[in-house]
Image: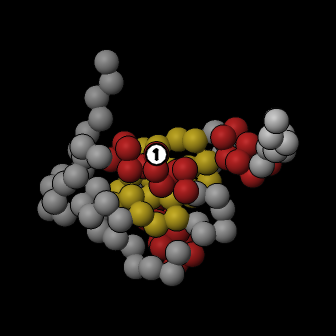
Amino acid sequence: MRKPRREPDPNRILALMSDVHLRLAGPRDQDALARLAALDDRVPPPGPHLIARADGEPRAAISLVTGEIIADPFRRSLELGELLRCHAAGARVRPSDPIPSVTRS
């Protein structure tokens, strides 16, 4: 007997189709980090941060010091948090460390 076919979740499809960019947060991202923390009802974790933007909007960020994630709770951000965790896994730093530079080959 076949299982009935489930209709795709439009929110999940939209999340998968979003244009996502990850990068180190800089001084120009401080307002976005503060906004994400406020929306998440939290204090911004210590930086430096890796920030995720979906379709040009900041949606989530991870502290490279603590691994703590702040995210917009009104947007689908679970996948962004997992993506941030994967990319930040080997990049933990102390608060006094300089922001790591990214080299491209």
Q: Residue at x 39, y 58 (%)?
A: 62
Residue at the limit of the structure toward the top, as seen here: 105
Front-lying residue, 100 or 8: 8
Residue 63: tell me if it is visible: yes
Q: Given the image, on which type of amino acid does mark 1 rest?
A: Leu
The image position of residue 101, as x and y in percent, is: 26, 39
As drawn, is 56 to the left or to the right of 13?
A: left
Q: How many marks?
A: 1
Look at the image and tell me in which quarter the N terminus lies.
top right
- What residue is disc 1 on? 83
Residue 76 placement: quadrant: bottom right
Q: Residue at x 82, y 44 (%)?
A: 6
As drawn, is 31 to the left or to the right of 12?
A: left
Look at the image and tell me in which quarter the C terminus lies.
top left
As drawn, is 26 to the left or to the right of 35?
A: left
As drawn, is 89 to the left or to the right of 18?
A: left
Coloration mode:
secondary structure
The image position of residue 77, as x and y in percent, is: 58, 57
Q: Residue at x 61, y 48 (%)?
A: 54
Vertical comparison of 37 with 65: above or below: below
Vertical comparison of 10 with 17: above or below: below
The image position of residue 67, as x and y in percent, is: 31, 60
Vertical comparison of 85 with 105: above or below: below
The image position of residue 25, as x and y in percent, is: 40, 53
Front-lying residue, 32 or 20: 20
Residue 48: tell me if it is visible: no
Q: Residue at x 39, y 73 (%)?
A: 44
Please tell me whether mark 1 sits on a helix, a strand or a loop. Answer: helix
Q: Answer few, some or many: residues within 10 Å of disc 1's Cα (few below 14, many 20 plus, some between 14 and 19).
A: some
